[in-house]
Amino acid sequence: MKESAKSFPPLSPAALHILLALSGEDRHGYAIMQDIARQTDGKYRPGPGTLYDNLEKLLNLGMIDEAPVRKSEDPRRRYYRLTRLGQKVLAEEVRRLEAVMRIARENLGLSGATKAL
């Protein structure tokens, strides 16, 4: 039975940022870590243990898979890519976070994303 993207619980910060990093292109582990640091302006830097534990979980869940190594790249590196399920789960998570933000803005009396707390 195929799982629906809606059947997954909210993503952990590490899983969310890994899927975001892979949504643009296939990447190896170190490149994923660099992209996460870029996404968060250096505020979140998962260590190798966190990264590779989450990559293994995402592989087992079918959200990512291994991509073929490019000829110009180091053959020792493992590249990862988003699967169709991973894309759907990421899109569902974005919708969930948008709803959370909408509620937070309403509750805090903020209009739009331009006001700071």
Image (spheres, helix red, strand yellow):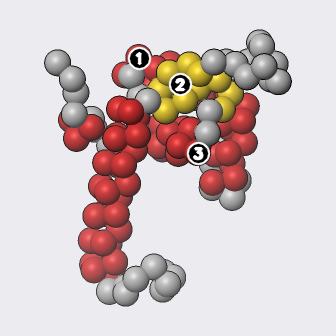
**Residue drawn where x is 68% and y is 27% of the image:** 28
Vertical order, 110 against 46 (above or below): below
Hey, what amino acid is under mark 2? Leu
Contact check, label 3 and label 1, Cβ < 8 Å:
no
Residue, disc 3: 24
Hey, what amino acid is under mark 1? Asn
First in sequence: mark 2 vs mark 3: 3
Can residue 57 be spotted in the picture? no
Mark 3: few/some/many CA within 10 Å (<14, 14-19, 20+) = few
Under tag 3, what secondary structure? Answer: helix
Mark 1: few/some/many CA within 10 Å (<14, 14-19, 20+) = few
Q: Nearer the viewer, mark 2 or mark 3?
A: 3
Residue, disc 1: 60
Give how far apart the Cα atoms at labels 2 and 1 are.
9 Å
Q: Quadrant of residue 21?
A: top right
First in sequence: mark 3 vs mark 1: 3
Vertical order, 37 against 29 (above or below): below
Residue, disc 2: 55
**Residue drawn where x is 44% and y is 30% of the image:** 83
Residue 20 % position (x, y)? 53, 45
Under tag 2, what secondary structure? Answer: helix
Quadrant the N terminus occupies: top left
